[in-house]
Image: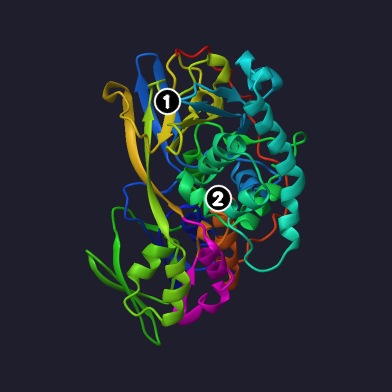
Amino acid sequence: MRIAIIGSGVSGLVSAWLLSKHHAVTLFEAESYLGGHTHTHDIELPSGRYRVDTGFIVHNPVNYPLLTRLFAELGVRTQATTMSFAVRHRTSNLEYNAASLSSLFCQRRNLVSPRFLGMIRDLLRFYRESPRLLEGSGPGPTLGEYLTQRRFGAAFRDEHLIPMASALWSAPPAQILSFPARYLVQFMANHQMLRVRDRPLWRVVHGGSATYVEALRARWTVTERLDCPVRRVTRDADAVTLATDAGLERFDQVVFACHSDQALALLSDASSVESEVLGAIRYQPNQAVLHTDAAPMPRNPRAWAAWNALIEGEGGGCTVSYCMNLLQGIASPEPLIVTLNPPRPIDPRKILRTMTYHHPIYSHASVAAQARKAEIQGRRRSWFAGAYWGWGFHEDGMRSAVAVADALGAPWAASSEPPTAAPHAAAPRPRELAA
C-alpha cells in the first residue's frame, strides 16, 4: 500500500518506521526538521558547543517501555538524570527544592513556618487520600473541586500541586484547576508520583533527544517531504487525496500524526463523529525560550532544580524553567535554561532560541472523547495517531503509533535476539553554574 503520514512528531516517526517495513510510506512535515517536540539545538557559546533539548527530554524504563525498547533496538545511548522540582514565590520570597530535606528547607525559616509545614502535611495527605478517586465511576470532580471538598490548604494548592502540574502539562494554573482530578491522579499513580520513596529513575538521551530521530532516519526507507505542509485531505471510495503546494497526490491510506485540531482542520469532508471527537480535544500554544538568563530561577543556588516553578504572586501566573545543565548533564559555566511562557521579558542578549510548541488541553470533554477513538479510527482510509489519545507524553504517542501500524499490517516484530538495554552513558557532572 501507499501510505501518507502527516506530521513527524514521535507518532509520525514511529508510524513511518514501522509501516515502511511493509508499505511505501511518504512522510509530510510542515517544518524544516523532523521530530516535532523532539527538538535538539546545536548551541555555540564562548565556553564551547552544546546540544540542548527544548521539547521532549526525559523518560524512564518503567513508564516508557515502548520508548525504551525503541532505544535498545536503535542502539541509542541514555544517561541518568534528576527530576528534582523547585518553587520560587516572587512576592513572599519562598523558595524550596523538594529533592532532599536539606534543599526542602534551604530557607531555614521554613522549619518553623506553619504555612510551609502545613503544605508538607497536605502533600503527604494527598498521597494517601487521592488514590481513592480511582475507585469511583463517572467523570468525577475537577481538581479544583476536589481540593476544596477535601479542604486542602492554599499553600499546598498554590505553591506545590498547581506549579508541579503546570510543569508536567505546560498549562496555566487556572487550567490545571479544571483538570479532571481522577485523570491527574491516575497519571501520578501510574508514574509512582504518589509516594515519597522508590520513585522511577529517569533518563535522558545522550547527546540530545534528536539522536534517536537520526538513528531512525538512518534505518528506514521513507520518502521525506520537509517544508511541505498538507493543505487539505479529501477521501473517496478508492483513495485519499492530499493537497500540498506542489499539487495533488493520491494514497491508499493516510495517518494523521499531527494534533487533533490540525487533523480536523485538514479534513475537507469530516464526518459529524470526527468533528465531535477531534473537536473535543483542544490544544494551546506555549512559547519556549532557550536562554542563559538566571532571573527566572530561584535566587538561592541550593534551591536550583531540574524543574523550577516561578510564582508571580497571589493569583498570579506560574512560569516553569527547566535547567538543562542538570537535566542533560551539560557542564557549561553558563546556565542553559528553557522557560515556558515567560511573563517578564528574558534579557534579549541571553536568548538563544525561541520556539512555539502546542500541548493538549485536558478536560472532562477531552477525556470522554478519548474513549470514542474506535468510532473514527480506520474509517474512510483514515487513521489518527498522537499523544493526545493518552496523557500527552512521548510514550502515549508511541503507543498510538504502534497500534496504527499493527492495524495496517505492520506489527512491531520481536527481535530474533534476546532484548538488551540500550547502552548507557555516564552523566557528566555539571560544573558550578553562574547564577
Q: How many marks?
A: 2
**Which residue is found at the position 49% from the left and 27% from the top?**
89
Magenta part of the chain: 361-384
Counting residues from the start of the chain, the first of labels 1 and 2 encountered is 1
On the rendered structure, is 59 left or right of 263? right
Q: Position of residue 308 (x, y in %)?
A: 51, 29
**Which residue is found at the position 66% from the left and 39% from the top?**
422
Q: Nearer the viewer, mark 1 or mark 2?
A: 1
Q: Image quadrant of residue 353? A: top left
**Which residue is found at the position 51% from the left and 77% from the top?**
378
Q: Secondary structure at mark 2?
A: loop
Q: Residues within 10 Å of mark 2 (few under 14, many from 20)?
A: many
Q: Height in image: 100 above or below 169? A: above
Q: CA distance from mark 1 to mark 2?
A: 25 Å
Q: Position of residue 48 (x, y in %)?
A: 40, 17
Q: Secondary structure at mark 1?
A: loop
On the rendered structure, is 2 left or right of 229? right
Q: Is residue 114 magenta?
A: no
What residue sits right under mark 1 in the picture? 296
On the rendered structure, is 136 left or right of 261? right
The type of residue carrying mark 1 is Pro
Q: Position of residue 424 (x, y in %)?
A: 65, 32
What residue sits right under mark 2 in the picture? 393
Q: Position of residue 266 (x, y in %)?
A: 33, 69
The type of residue carrying mark 2 is Phe
Q: Considering depth in this image, is 299 or 359 the residue closer to the camera?
A: 299
Image quadrant for the C terminus? top left
**Which residue is found at the position 72% from the left and 58% from the top?**
134
